[in-house]
Image (spheres, rainbow, N blue to C red):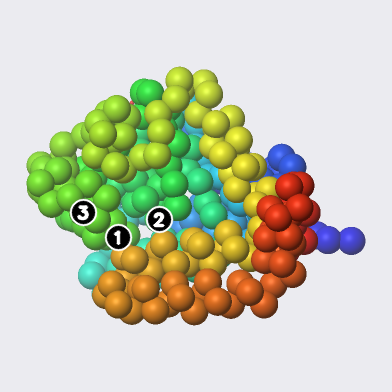
Amino acid sequence: MSIEPAYENILVRQEGRVGIVQINRPKAMNALNAPTMSEIMTALELFDADSGVGAMTLTGDARAFAAGADIKQMATSSAVEMLSSPFIGYWDRLRAIRKPVIAAVNGWCLGGGAELAMACDMIVAGEGAKFGQPEINLGVIPGAGGTQRLTRAVGKAIAMEMVLNARQLSAAEAAAFGLVNRVVPDERCLAEAVRLAGEIAARAPVAVRLAKEAVNAAFETSLSEGVALERRLFSLLFSTRDQKEGMAAFIEKRPADWQGH
Ligand code: CAA
């Protein structure tokens, strides 16, 4: 009998092969304190290790995906405490998740919340979603990857405005600037993210994991290193049963039966 962890700040469920993690601190606009981040990462890591799950969706509620790191938790911290605390490291744990994670964003997506969404692999936004890095208003800067991931996503001009001058982006602007994959009516946001995650979860699992690894490597490596990594991962897939099945299914004009090995 498996023992489910008891969560206080998130809700966790599964639909088909999609694991769904919902941030659930409505009174604090889903602000991300250490217990909440710890629970989010534990839930995602458990789904990552579960062969019955092929992709995950991370969401908040109608008012906020997350209004940032918890300001009340950080307000009196010293530099040494911030440097030695594991808190910001929770965002890095998302990078180690091997299966795709799709953020479903309604409402406020600010500061550490935007950094959490950007650390996911794709973002589906409700039309009322608002993205921003307002840390400058608090006398600090983004601390969980915002200056780097935002700049890579939207380019220097918009990133500078957002980080230096707290410019907010509407969902439509976020789509136009390449920050989000698609914008849907607010009430359709989670369903659309789960649908997209479900489509991916139905694909060849090892190829999906290596595809994610290869695309993410484009942000970390030179072109020649990235292309070399891609070549190795591509070749590695020829050791899987699913590669044989996928190519045989194409030739035999039938759907492939993926097994995940
Ligand atoms: N941390 C802690 N509590 C927060 C919070 C946050 N980031 N965001 C909102 N809350 C709390 C509010 O304090 C308030 O609590 P009380 O009822 O106890 O006063 C409750 O959530 C509701 O918030 P508001 O009354 O402010 O709601 P609103 O509708 O008027 O405004 C908002 C919504 C625009 C999101 C506003 O709450 C806001 O600006 N929040 C802060 C956004 C922010 O600065 N985020 C960056 C945080 S720093 C960071 O994330 C660092 C990093 O890079 C890792």
212 is higher (above) or lower (below) than 162: below
Identify the residue position indicated by label 3 in the image. 151
Measure the C-alpha gap from mark 2 to mark 1.
Answer: 8 Å
Apparent side of residue 253 relative to residue 189 in the rendered image (left or right)? right
**What amino acid is found at the position of numbered circle 1 in the picture?**
Gly
Is 250 on the left or on the right of 192, as rendered? right
Q: Quadrant of residue 142?
A: bottom left
- Front residue of 154 and 224: 224
The relative height of residue 128 versus residue 196 in the rendered view (above or below) is: above
Q: Is residue 83 visible?
A: no
Circle 1 residues within 10 Å: few <14, some 14–19, many ≥20:
some
Q: Of 114 and 4, which appears nearest the observer?
A: 114
- Please give the name of the residue rendered at 32% of the width and 30% of the height, measured from the top-left corner: 171
- Ranked by sequence position, the earlier of labels 2 and 3 is 2
Residue that carries the numbered disc 2 in the rendered image: 119
Dot 1 falls on a residue whose secondary structure is loop
Image x and y of residue 80, in percent: 26, 74
Amino acid carrying label 2: it is Ala
The reply to whether discs 2 and 3 touch (Cβ–Cβ < 8 Å) is no
Residue 133 sits in quarter: top left
Circle 2: element type: helix
Check contact, mark 2 vs mark 1: CB within 8 A. Answer: yes
**What residue type is disc 3 on?**
Thr
